[in-house]
Structure formats: structure tokens, C-alpha cells
Amino acid sequence: MGYCKIQCVHKTRSIWKIMLILCVPLSCVLIFRSLVFTFFVHLMPMSKCSLESGKMLTLDNAVDASLDLLSRPDVQTCTSWKAPIIWEGMFDPYLYDKEHKEEGSSVALIVFAVGRYLDVYLESFLNSSEHHFMLALPVTYYVFTDIPEKVPDIKLAPQRSLKVIKVERHSRWQDISMMRMKTISEVIEEDIRHHCTYVFCFDVDQVFSGRFGSEALGDTVALLHAHFYHLPKNLFTYDRNPKSTAYMETGDFYYHAAVFGGSWKSVKALTETCYQNIMEDKKNNVEALWHDESHLNKYLWLHKPSRVLSPEYCWDNSIGYSRDIQVTRLLWAPKYYDTLRTF
């Protein structure tokens, strides 16, 4: 009996060795194919801006006329509806800071840190923001969490303050993601509109790494998704379900819900509409493919953003080298979905 067990063990080990020998080359092939695909995707040229001067843009503010649309021939610097796409090298940061200081601009930064996301990400997010986000302007942080007592004590610069607001913890991360639209709309109505001119909403699992300044401010601000901006439109992951209010056959770009903003009026309108559409889907037992991001893309297709931020403003280092990314301003933090999204 003991001899049979030993033989079985040896056979099992042999099988595992054969599987390992087969699997390791296969995994290498898959990784290599992924790297090659990424490399060639980022060699695909973007569309080009048809305008010759910033003066031809639909202006968010007077300084936009100074944008050098021809300074970056390697990328698309404006949209078909004459909104700027902001890249490094196009703008003078001093001019934007000066303009917004004179206008008395102030910014509300909204971030949700629910469950384990608070422990893992919030402190580094806030600390890095203090070094890079809208340093020339007054900023109020609005931190939404289910455990207010665990929000870290961050040393804030002058003209910067932090408000902590308790929110319900939903059983699914998808619901947290989608229901934030309702919460953002409510806090704008109750508080932000009385104190701030602009609002920016961020995912917490990110770290600021460079200037994220007043050049990003506009009436409605969207962000090009780092994984999609070089892809053809037929590969964009819009919601293709006709039963969903987020359904799209085509669009302009694929926008990332990790960062969006604008004037308080525009962000309130955006979040209210997205929330209403989410609730309409719920009534019909439908859930959009990428939840609030799908609804955001639908809204921004129907209501064109006045300003689009390049992927510099939310870059994923796992993509690797991309020749058109000259600077990174906000970086994806490591994702731990298996543990952080378990309630």
C-alpha cells in the first residue's frame, strides 16, 4: 500500500512538471503578445486638430486663445466641436493661474473612500494632492466615507480645507460606484455651490505625480481613457445593450470616469442625469456594462465637454512607454480588486 502511494506521488509530481513546462512558455507567449499589441496600438496615429490657432476654439476662458494647438503635431489637440484637448507643451501655466486668481476661482475636490479603499489609498491620494492639485487656488476636499473616524489627519496648506461626510456602505462595489452620482448632485446643491466655482470628482485609487492645475478647469471637463485613446472607435467599450439608457452605437471618444469635473452647475446637471438614468435602468432590471462610466460616456456624447484632458491627467504605468506622454500628472495606484471589492 505504501509503495503504491509513493508511486502515485511520483506520477503526480511528473504530471505537474509537464504542465509547468507547457504553461510557462504559453504564459510568456501571452505576455509577449500583449506587449506587442500595446506597442503597436500606441504607434497608431490620432486624428489631428483642424484648427490653426487657439483663437478659433470655443473658449472656456480668455486664456484658451493662447493655447498652441500646433505645438503637439503628434497628438490631437482639439475636438471636432472646437474644444481643446490639453497636453503638455500647449499652455502657459502662469497665464492660467493668473486668470483664475483674478476671477476668484475656487475648486471642490470630491473623493469617495469606502470600506478598505480608505485604508489603502486615501492618505497617499490626499498627500499627493497637496503637492500637485490646483496649488494656485483655494481648494476644499469633500471626503465621502462610511468610517469618518479613520480619515487621516492631513497637513493642509493655507486656503485649503477638508470636509468629511458619512455615506452608506452598499453591499456591492458597483452600487457604490453608481450611487455616487446622486451623492455628488446633493452635496453640490446643499453646500458646494455656495462656496466653490468648480468641482472635480476623482477615484481614490490614484496618486498625483505632477501639476494638475488651473489649465484643467472648464465648464464641462472630460478625460481621455489611457487604454483607449489610440484605439479605433469600434473597440470602445460603450454599453451596446439597447435596453440600457447608457446604450451607444458610436461616440466621440472613450472617457474615463476616474476623473471628471467642471463648473458646479454643469457637474450637477451631469450627475443628476446619470443618476436618473441609472435608476431608470434599475426599474427595468438592467445594469450598464461599466456602470457609472457607461452613463458618463452617454451623457458626454449628448452634451459635448467644453474641455478634454489628455491621458497625462490619469495615466496607467502598466501600459508602458508611450511617446506622446511627456509628463504624468495623476497615476493609477496598484489595484487590489480581489480583496478591496469583497464586502
Image: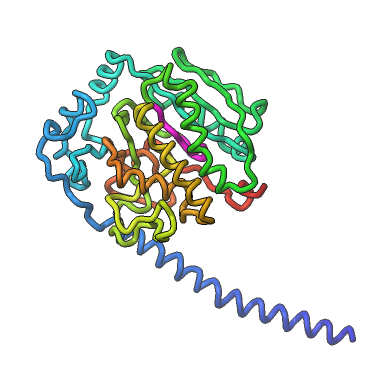
For the N terminus, the quadrant is bottom right
Q: As displayed, is residue 95 above or below residue 23? A: above
**Among all residues in the image, which is located at the extreme right?**
1
Q: Residue 53: x, y in percent?
A: 11, 35
Residue at image position (50%, 42%) is 333
Quarter of the image for residue 77 reads top left
Along the line of sight, the residue nearer the viewer: 171 or 315: 171
Along the line of sight, the residue nearer the viewer: 104 or 74: 104
Along the line of sight, the residue nearer the viewer: 74 or 145: 145
Residue at image position (23%, 29%) is 60
Residue at image position (46%, 31%) is 185
Residue at image position (51%, 40%) is 205
Q: As displayed, is residue 286 above or below residue 255? A: below
**Among all residues in the image, which is located at the extreme left?**
52
In this rendering, position of residue 208 left or right of residue 309: right
Q: Residue 104: x, y in percent?
A: 32, 14
The residue stretch that appears in magenta: 199-207
Quarter of the image for residue 100 reads top left
In this rendering, position of residue 236 left or right of residue 118: left
Q: Residue 287: x, y in percent?
A: 50, 54
Q: Does the magenta stretch include residue 125?
A: no
Question: Majority secondary structure of the magenta segment?
Answer: strand
Q: Residue 234: x, y in percent?
A: 31, 62
